[in-house]
């Protein structure tokens, strides 16, 4: 089990900082963001080198970053009004504790620097998901058109080492899914399902999450036609809930994963349910899948594959399908133009959360599936349900911060994870992202 080193808890007030300048929340508007639980001086440089060290940035970079950020935050109402101005109590607020470090990071590394600055405790918000939702909803307006040509100043290419070769895929999966089963159990519901649920109503209490996950799984199994005697291949085991539910229908399930931690717990859960004879959990790359199946199901797996390997992924799906079979996918998607920009760019998520991953567009899914002789027979989106799922995960994670610390994860990790969950939630709330269930069958449209 890989666990980041624990960094000592920081004192309540970072020394030597001018809190809240220039985006200080004035009395009488909204509660100020909480004082950060991290001081940069306490950050473990071995575990978090790019958080512990503020990058160098020339005056031009800092000027551009300050101009763009102040312009965007003022226009979007994310800053506190000046003293004497009419107070607007609506909407989230962003408070910068260390302006110099904040602008250096944004000027040098763009959105990665923005996230690393949060991890370092250099800025906070009274509503992190709210701030990020507003920014995501106006992402195309944040940088004026003439300055977009300077994008290369603060973005970098994805590391070649993160490509999902067979060895690379195993490494990338370990870096996320093998962090700790105990960590994931702190914020997931008892089904341990790490993908979007489908709710019956909004807003949803945490207690409704497990039934909502079963609703999602049942919709996928129905889409794939899984029932008594179905030979089912699942690509991406998770912690085994879909395999358990399919086996309870009478299916015989082969499920593939590269996560040793997930495989071990999935096997325990399957054995506890008395379904070992119906479910075979294999530590195997999807490219090495064997056999032919009546149905194939893969839930939010394509995002981890990487664009270079989407042809191999759809080839594996098609090769595994018996004549007349059905493939049910659940996939996060983004707009095609946004996907093309993201594909070549190292992002906060690819650096800290899902190395080697890329969210596809619907066009990319259609193109790559059609190239292997598959057609899209059904396509249903429900992004608002993912936003609600992520809200519940984020609130649960935040409520269990002491338990996260007891597991050996330091405050920088906790802020990184909170940022990741809020960042993802914002993507769905702003409709920058969507999640879809698709049915693929043999034959392309003529």
Image (cartoon, rainbow, N blue to C red):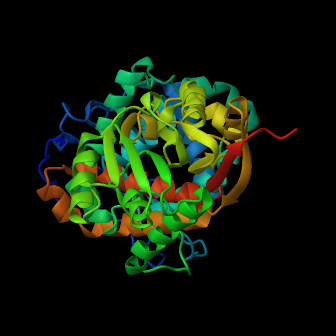
Q: The N terminus lies in which quarter of the figure?
A: top left
Q: In the rendered image, which quarter is residue 202 located in?
A: bottom right
From the viewer's perspective, tell me whether residue 366 is left or right of residue 154: right
Residue 108 versus residue 111 in the image, above or below: above
* Rendered residue at 52%/41% (across/down): 303
Q: Is residue 136 above or below residue 143?
A: below
* Residue 435 versus residue 371 in the image, above or below: below
Query: Is 387 located above or below residue 172 in the figure?
Result: below
Question: Farthest right residue?
Answer: 446
| Residue 350 in the image, given as x and y percentages of width and height | 44, 35
Numbered label tally: 0
Instruction: Please tell me which residue is depicted at 50% across the width and 61% down the height of the picture.
Output: 196
Measuring from the top left, give residue 360's x and y in whole percent. 61, 40
Residue closer to the observer: 168 or 428: 168
For the C terminus, give its image quadrant: top right
For the residue pair 166 and 274, the one nearer the viewer reads as 274
**Would you say residue 363 is visible in this rendering?**
yes
Residue occupying the point 70% across, 55% down: 379
Residue plotted at (24% across, 67% down): 400
> In x, y percent, where is residue 306?
52, 31
Front in this rendered view, residue 307 or 137:
307
Residue farthest toward the top in the current orientation of the protein: 160
Instruction: From the top left corner, tell me how far across and down residue 264 is, in percent.
Output: 22, 48
Asked if residue 378 lies left or right of residue 88, the reply is right
Q: Is residue 387 visible?
A: no
């Amino acid at each position: 089990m890989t666990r980041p080193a624990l960094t000592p808890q920081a004192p309540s007030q970072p020394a030597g900082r001018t809190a809240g300048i220039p985006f200080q929340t004035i009395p009488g508007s909204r509660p100020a963001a909480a004082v950060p639980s991290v001081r940069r001086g306490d950050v473990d440089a071995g575990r978090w080198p790019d958080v512990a060290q503020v990058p160098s940035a020339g005056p031009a970079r800092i000027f551009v970053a300050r101009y763009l950020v102040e312009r965007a935050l003022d226009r979007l109402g994310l800053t506190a009004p000046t003293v004497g101005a009419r107070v607007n109590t609506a909407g989230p607020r962003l408070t910068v504790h260390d302006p110099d470090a904040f602008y250096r990071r944004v000027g040098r590394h763009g959105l990665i620097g923005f996230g690393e600055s949060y991890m370092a405790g250099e800025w906070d918000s009274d509503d992190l998901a709210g701030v990020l939702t507003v920014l995501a909803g106006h992402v195309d307006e944040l940088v004026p058109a003439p300055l977009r040509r300077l994008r290369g100043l603060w973005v970098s290419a994805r590391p070649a080492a993160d490509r999902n070769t067979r060895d690379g895929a195993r490494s990338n999966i370990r870096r996320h899914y093998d962090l700790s089963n105990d960590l994931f159990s702190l914020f997931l519901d008892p089904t341990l399902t790490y993908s979007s649920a489908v709710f019956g109503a909004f807003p949803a209490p945490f207690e409704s999450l497990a039934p909502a996950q079963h609703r999602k799984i049942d919709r996928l199994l129905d889409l794939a036609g899984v029932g008594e005697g179905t030979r089912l291949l699942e690509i991406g085991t998770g912690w085994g809930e879909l395999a358990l539910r399919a086996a309870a229908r009478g299916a015989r399930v082969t499920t593939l994963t590269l996560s040793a931690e997930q495989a071990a717990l999935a096997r325990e859960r399957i054995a506890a349910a008395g379904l070992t004879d119906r479910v075979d959990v294999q530590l195997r790359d999807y490219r090495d899948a064997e056999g032919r199946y009546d149905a194939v199901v893969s839930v939010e797996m394509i995002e981890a594959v990487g664009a270079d390997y989407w042809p191999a992924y759809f080839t594996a799906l098609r090769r595994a399908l018996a004549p007349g079979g059905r493939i049910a996918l659940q996939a996060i998607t983004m707009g095609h133009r946004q996907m093309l920009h993201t594909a070549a760019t190292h992002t906060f998520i690819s650096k800290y959360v899902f190395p080697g991953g890329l969210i596809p567009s619907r066009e990319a899914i259609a193109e790559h599936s059609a190239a292997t002789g598959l057609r899209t027979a059904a396509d249903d989106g429900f992004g608002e349900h993912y936003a609600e799922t992520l809200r519940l995960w984020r609130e649960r994670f935040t409520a269990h911060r002491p338990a996260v610390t007891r597991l050996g994860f330091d405050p920088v990790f906790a802020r990184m994870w909170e940022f990741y969950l809020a960042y993802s939630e914002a993507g769905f709330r702003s409709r920058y992202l969507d999640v879809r269930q698709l049915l693929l069958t043999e034959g392309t449209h003529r």
